[in-house]
Image (cartoon, rainbow, N blue to C red):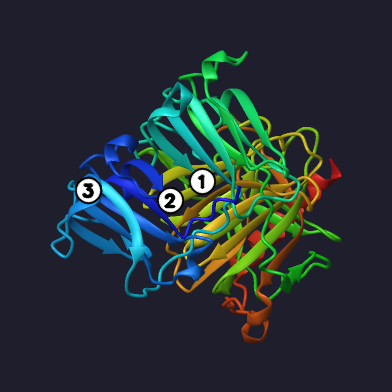
């Protein structure tokens, strides 16, 4: 049987601006009640799937009545935040969804699809269905989650068009944010699909108790292969592309012979809080990179898990992404996490399972337009997905390294062995490094603070 290769991937939402319950559509739906969305779709995103090039005029067609009847609206790849808008006037009226050819349009691409997971409300693949293509941290999350928490009783798993050659697996978790008991389901390269008709019969009795789903076994893409920037932190002078930001002066950095150390004091964070109690004073080392890219670093992890930091994509204080290793004393207990911070709101996009106690950690972020994909690895060869997200960052954005010390945990010391920027081969000739703005001659006050920082670091190093 052939591998499932969708031409379009449609992300549907209950409310405007991509809020409320969410679901995926990759095949015709004669009656949207079967996927829990009868007459209550108010916004959607349409992505080009892996097979879109075979028919570039393909569109999703929304129908007013079931069985593809009544008034209809055809939409090409793109983001549609409000179907109530008079240009569409089609919100809360969609009873069936089909696909077909129409005029050619440009639009966003979905990215890689290693596995396609169909989850059913009842045993034997009956009842309402939800399709999973990416990690979902919370099946009850009102801001982009689904309505399927503790309601999955049977599962079908299909090999996707980007299935890794070494196999992949889906991990189902008992609690949100990939916590609690878990059950992994492995898909080998020789298999086309795997079926679990009744989760209640498993020894773990996982029927009606799934709250988060993670797809393991990803590989970072081979798309960004050309190294255009590398800093191995040899010497004691900052590269001209870098810009050091430390709003409260509580952090410190030092280039050792072949690695970078970043120290942070308790309370330094990059988080607006839940309405109050946040902190944005964590130090970061940033450089400007235009267009698409991949960034990568390697961290040395101590047995005490003193490290808390990682890669940062930074547009401004209200729009940034963090891929990081958390410290052992923190509540996240050394996890690898990918977080999205937009409009003073925090959202966990994924976690890197099984990397809590590694001795070295590789982190990688890839940008394609507004889509960001995160990966982590213990050896730099076998990569695990830490989640994906879509965020508008403009043509150029700042990228780099950050370190945190959230709450009242002990001071953290985070070590980075290198920082690299990769581009596509076709884009290397056009890449030009962006030199950070220079601050001019150092003032007496700045010089005194610099010397005090150096003395303090020297004293720390002695002990």
User: Between 280 and 17, which is closer to the camera in this rendering?
Assistant: 17
The reply to whether the C-beta atoms of the residues labelled 1 and 2 are less than 8 Å apart is: yes
User: Between 278 and 123, which is closer to the camera in this rendering?
Assistant: 123
Query: Quick check: 146 above or below 199?
Result: below
Q: Residue furthest bottom?
A: 429
The label shown at residue 94 is: 3
Residue at image position (48%, 65%) is 52
The C terminus appears in which quarter of the rendering? top right
Could you say whether the residue bearing mark 2 is in a helix, strand or loop? loop
Earlier residue among tags 1 and 3: 3
| Residue at the disc numbered 1 | 133
Q: Quadrant of residue 59?
A: bottom left
Earlier residue among tags 3 and 2: 2
Are there few (<14), some (14-19), or many (20+) residues within 10 Å of tag 2? many
Residue at image position (60%, 16%) is 202
- Mark 1 and mark 2: span between their CA atoms? 10 Å
Is there any visible trace of residue 446 in the rendered image? Answer: yes
Q: Quadrant of residue 289?
A: bottom right
The label shown at residue 26 is: 2
User: Between 345 and 4, which is closer to the camera in this rendering?
Assistant: 4
Coordinates of residue 60 in the picture (x, y in percent): 33, 59
Query: Quick check: 11 above or below 367?
Result: above
Disc 1 versus disc 2: nearer the observer: 2
């Amino acid at each position: 049987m052939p591998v499932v290769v969708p031409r379009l991937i449609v992300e549907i939402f209950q409310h405007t601006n991509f809020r409320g319950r969410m679901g995926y559509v990759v095949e015709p739906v004669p009656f949207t009640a079967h996927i829990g969305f009868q007459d209550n779709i108010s916004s959607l995103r349409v992505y080009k799937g892996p097979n879109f090039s075979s028919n570039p005029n393909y569109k999703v067609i929304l129908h007013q009545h079931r069985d593809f009847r009544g008034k209809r609206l055809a939409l090409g790849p793109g983001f549609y935040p409000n179907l109530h808008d008079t240009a569409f006037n089609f919100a809360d009226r969609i009873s069936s969804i089909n696909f077909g050819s129409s005029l050619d349009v440009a639009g966003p691409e979905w990215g890689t699809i290693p596995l396609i997971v169909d989850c059913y409300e009842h045993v034997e693949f009956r009842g309402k269905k939800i399709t999973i293509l990416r990690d979902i941290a919370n099946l009850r999350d009102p801001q982009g989650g689904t309505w399927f928490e503790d309601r999955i009783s049977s599962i079908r798993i299909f090999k996707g068009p980007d299935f890794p050659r070494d196999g992949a697996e889906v991990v189902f978790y008992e609690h949100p944010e990939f916590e609690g008991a878990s059950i992994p389901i492995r898909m080998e390269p020789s298999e086309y699909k795997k079926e679990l008709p009744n989760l209640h019969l498993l020894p773990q009795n996982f029927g009606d108790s799934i709250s988060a789903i993670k797809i393991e076994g990803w590989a970072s893409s081979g798309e960004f292969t050309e190294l255009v920037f590398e800093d191995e932190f040899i010497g004691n002078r900052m590269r001209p592309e870098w810009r050091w930001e430390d709003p409260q002066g509580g952090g410190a950095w030092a280039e050792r012979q072949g690695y970078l150390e970043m120290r942070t004091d308790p309370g330094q964070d990059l988080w607006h809080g839940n309405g109050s109690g946040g902190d944005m004073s964590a130090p970061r080392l940033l450089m400007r990179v235009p267009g698409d890219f991949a960034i990568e670093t390697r961290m040395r992890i101590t047995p005490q898990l003193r490290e808390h930091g990682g890669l940062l994509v930074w547009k401004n204080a209200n729009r940034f992404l963090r891929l990081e290793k958390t410290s052992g004393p923190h509540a996240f207990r050394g996890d690898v996490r990918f977080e999205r911070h937009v409009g003073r709101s925090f959202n966990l996009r994924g976690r890197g399972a099984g990397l809590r106690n590694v001795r070295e950690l590789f982190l990688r972020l890839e940008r394609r337009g507004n889509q960001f994909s995160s990966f982590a690895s213990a050896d730099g060869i076998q990569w695990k997905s830490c989640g994906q997200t879509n965020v508008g960052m403009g043509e150029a954005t700042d990228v780099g390294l950050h370190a945190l010390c959230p709450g009242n945990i002990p001071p953290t010391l985070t070590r980075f062995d290198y920082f690299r920027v990769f581009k596509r081969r076709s884009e290397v000739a056009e890449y030009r490094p962006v030199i950070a703005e220079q601050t001019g001659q150092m003032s007496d006050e700045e010089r005194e603070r610099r010397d005090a920082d150096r003395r303090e670091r020297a004293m720390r190093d002695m002990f």
